[in-house]
Each structure stands twice: as C-alpha cells, then as structure tokens.
Image: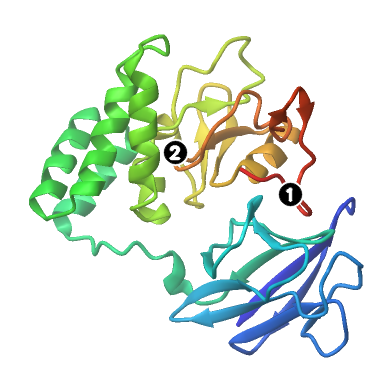
Amino acid sequence: MLRVVVRERGASDGHELVFEKVEVTIGRIQGNDIVLPKGNVSKRHARVVLRDGKMIVVDLKSTNGTFVNGRKLTSPIVVREEDHVYIGDFMIALATDDEQEHIDTLDADPTESRLLAAIAQNDAASREVYADWLEQQGHSDRAQFIRVQDEIASRGPEDTPVNELAEQLRELAKRVDIAWRLKVARPMVEGCLGLEVQCPRDWGAMASTTRSDVRYCNGCRQHVYYCTTIESAREHAMRRDCIAVDASLMRYPNDTQRPPRPIIAGRPVAAPPGGVRR
C-alpha cells in the first residue's frame, strides 16, 4: 500500500491519497493517478513504483523536472519516507505500509544487542568495543562510521582536520542504513532555546523514546528530532524544536533557517522549480 501526501506551495496542510497498486502516475491531466492541475506540471510528469519494498521515483522527461530534496532527478531514485519530492508548485511525501523498508539490514545477535543497549545509555567504552566487533564481522563501513564520529567529538571545532573528518563521515553515512545510524549517530543538538551558546550535547547523549527518530534531553527537558533532510530540519527549527541533523547531508551556514542560494556574478541564482538545488 502506497500513501501519498500532496501539499501545494504556500498551503499549511495537504491531503492524503492511498493506493493499492505498485505503480502510480503523476501529471497535469486526467488519466493520471494523481492530478496536479498547474502549468508547471507536465501532462505525464512522473511516476512512483513500489519494487521489493522500496519506493522509486521516476521522472517521465518532464519539462520542468522532478526534484527530490531540492536535487533534480537525472535517473530513477529510491526515496524514503523522510524525503520530499517536488513537482512544480507541489511537494509530495511518500510512505508505504511495508515495514521491511526501515528494518536494519544487519541482523542483531546477542552481542550486538548488548552493545547497542549500552550505547543507548551513552557508554563510550561500548562504542569502541562495538566498532571492533563490527570490523570482525566484516562491516568495515559501520565500524569506521562510529570511529570517525568519536574522533570528531574528541576535537574542538577550531581543529583543522574536523572538516576533513566531516567529509569522510558524510560519505560513510551514505553507505549505511538510516535505521542503524539512528542508534549510533552523534550529531550535535541544534536550536536549543534554553542555552545562549551551542548545546554541548549530541544525539547519542539523549534519552531514548518510543520513536527511533525522537529523543529526550533531560537537561532542557525538550524532545530532540533527528532530521535526515535540511527541509525537515528547517521545519522543526521554525517550530523552535531541538534538532540533530544527519551526517549524510551537506551543511551550509544558517541552512536550517533559510535555503542557501548560490551566487553568480554577485547575483543570487533563482531556485529551481519546487525546491533549492544542492
């Protein structure tokens, strides 16, 4: 079952459509499963395909393009529930009832379960042991992801190697599951209104809740939301929520406050239809 929420630009809310089919077409004219009646939407603009529990967005050679999280599609792409699809003046969120999409692909054994439970309690030594265990199991990307995070956390922001480590972490994050990253990630908490300076705590130090993407700060007594897109981070920041931004994202100054705009010849470049290109 595919669930689609469509929201027009400027609208405060959207409407949800549910489909019991594996392919859904989107376009300007009748005959499409989802009709978006605006001039910047092509007659047959895009389609969403469910395959092996994954949601795939395909642009159908549309005039103005299809964008996912602000990036124009040049080929079919697998999207997750936290991603935003932009078509003309519309933003589309996709979800599926197939629970396999969010299951961590590494089968937990008793040793891993014990180590992850200790990491959830902010036990630094268990992170080191877990990284070694992952290496022994042949999961070098995950092991390195933990080690690079801990190396960044041990340095101050003024240290020159931090930027190089951040780039390395971003590439590693793209190669491991988001479900697993949520358990071991250590992005700094941003947007805390209870502090006049940067919050000194990270996602790993927050208390777990019933949701894997939401934790609780016992210091300021606020929920912290894990954001896997800049758009979702910006939305939470506008609501004055505390956030932790996933390491896979390219960051810009003040990017959770307003979209970055590239400058060419001293003039801001207009944003592409439906989003900001990055």
Label 2 is placed on what type of residue?
Ala
- The total number of labels drawn is 2
Closer to us: 195 or 9? 9
Residues under labels 1 and 2: Cα distance? Answer: 21 Å
Residue 245 vs residue 201, the one in the foreground: 245
The residue carrying mark 1 is 275
Q: Position of residue 161 (x, y in %)?
A: 32, 18
Crowding around mark 2 (Cα neighbors within 10 Å: few <14, some 14 to 19, many 20+) is: many
Q: Would you identify the image quadrant in which residue 8 lies? A: bottom right
Please give the name of the residue rendered at 54% of the width and 47% of the height, measured from the top-left corner.
Answer: 228
Asked if residue 38 is positioned above or below residue 144 in the image, the reply reads below
Labelled pair 1, 2 in contact (Cβ < 8 Å): no
Residue 196 rendering spot, x and y as whole percentages: 63, 9
Q: Which residue is mark 2?
A: 247
Q: Which mark is residue 55?
A: none
Residue found farthest to the front: 265
Left or right of residue 58: residue 239: right
Q: Which secondary structure lies at badge 1?
A: loop
Q: Position of residue 170 (x, y in %)?
A: 40, 39
